[in-house]
Amino acid sequence: MPNLTLWSRRLRPAHLAGEARRIGKKVLRKIRRPERRVVTLEPAGEARGRALVSYIVDGLLVPPESQLPRGHTHFWESRQIARTFVDLGYTVDVIHWTNQAFEPVEPYDVLLDVRLNLERLAPSVGDACLKIQHIETAHYAFHNRAQQERLDALEERRGVRLAPRKTIEPNRAIETADFGIAVGNAFTIGTYEHAGTPIFRVPISVPCVYAAPEDKDFAACRRRFLWFGSGGLVHKGLDLVLEAFADMPEYELAVCGPIHMERDFEAAYVRELYESPNIRTLGWVDVAGERFRKLRRTTLGVVYPSCSEGGGGSVITCLHAGLLPIVTREASVDLHGFGTELPEASVGAIREAVREMAATDPSTLRDQAMTAWRHARTQHTRETFARDYRRVAERILSADGESDDG
């Protein structure tokens, strides 16, 4: 019975240890209370003004950079954004984007926020304050509609109704902002074009980089693939990937993500996740750990048919690891001579793309993987993010209204 399969897995020592670590982190976060904190950073010399950054405050509560969580790029990026404005001469106050109690007691020259605080705080900071939306998702209207369409399609295919997991609150951040800065590509930026707000692009960073895949045995790994993502499993297309591989026993799939956090999905796909011999469900995998390093050596590509992304960070990490992407346009990842963009998000399209990639000559696969790796190393590192973010911030502060949203 499916329930017996699930309970047997949930009672395993490794699962119980993981749950204990997760609960411990939640308790520690509650003790730190980041949603209530205000962190102030001072420039080296006399301040030219004051900036308010409303994003992720956690990274500024963990002094050693090595202790920053690697589960999402926003922990480091939010920290770097604040430091950028400090380096440009501003005193910077940093709050968490979910902090709805904060009210300004100081005048601000710059206000940067991701979603909810921009419109709320705009009247308090005044018209003279430069307002910037940091864009790390597609526009909420596109995002929510796309997710609902995926849930509806799943119900039609399988007769099961799952709860939405990635809903974004309606907001008027882009309409309130003077400028936007997006970590996604032209797809993501295009979902905001209705507002007419100038938007600049700073390509998303990654928490880890890896050596080039020059010595990888592409002939040996050509039938092995990966799904690698975080929460919102239907949103990120895991249902489609599981259905595709369940009927392709000659190909292997490793599933890396917090599956146990979405128990309705886990119950609906228990056969594919735990009872299909060609599918391994590994759970959350640390990108700096040996398990992921082994996967990058023994796996050909990542299959990620997401319905809406703000930068495709998990796929970008896989590009750094030398994996070839099979993605939807909505995954927000640029392909330049490598990988496959799916013509549609369907089980059939995924099967066809997997088979075609696996049938490609190993030397061609190596060339494409090296191209993907070089692209990631050139465009998506912490160093390039810091450089490009400063360039864009300087341009915005100089009131140059021409965006570079390509």
Image (tube, rainbow, N blue to C red):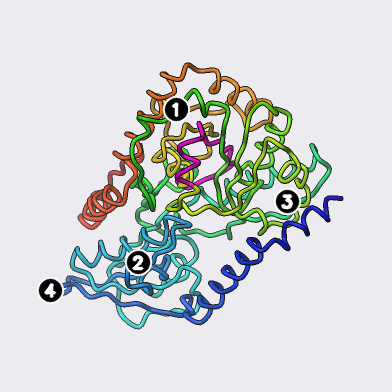
Q: CA distance from mark 1 to mark 4?
A: 54 Å
Residue picked out by circle 3: 265
Q: CA distance from mark 2 to mark 4?
A: 21 Å
Q: Which residue is mark 2?
A: 111
Q: Earlier in the sequence, mark 2 or mark 3?
A: 2
**Residue 181 horizontal/vertical position (percent):** 36, 51
| Mark closer to the chain start, 2 or 4 | 4
What amino acid is found at the position of numbered circle 4 in the picture? Answer: Gly
In space, the residues marked 1 and 3 are separated at their CA atoms by 34 Å
User: The residue tagged with tag 4: helix, strand or loop?
Assistant: loop
Give how far apart the Cα atoms at labels 4 and 3 are: 53 Å
- Residue linked to disc 4: 45
Which sits earlier in the primary sequence, circle 4 or circle 3?
Answer: 4
Residues packed near mark 3 inside 10 Å, few (<14), some (14 to 19) or many (20 plus): many
Q: Quick one: 227 or 217, which is closer to the camera?
A: 217
Tell me the SS state at disc 3.
helix
Alpha carbons under labels 2 and 3: distance apart: 39 Å
Labels 2 & 3 near each other (Cβ < 8 A): no
Give amino acid for label 2. Leu
Reading the image, the residue beneath label 1 is: 217
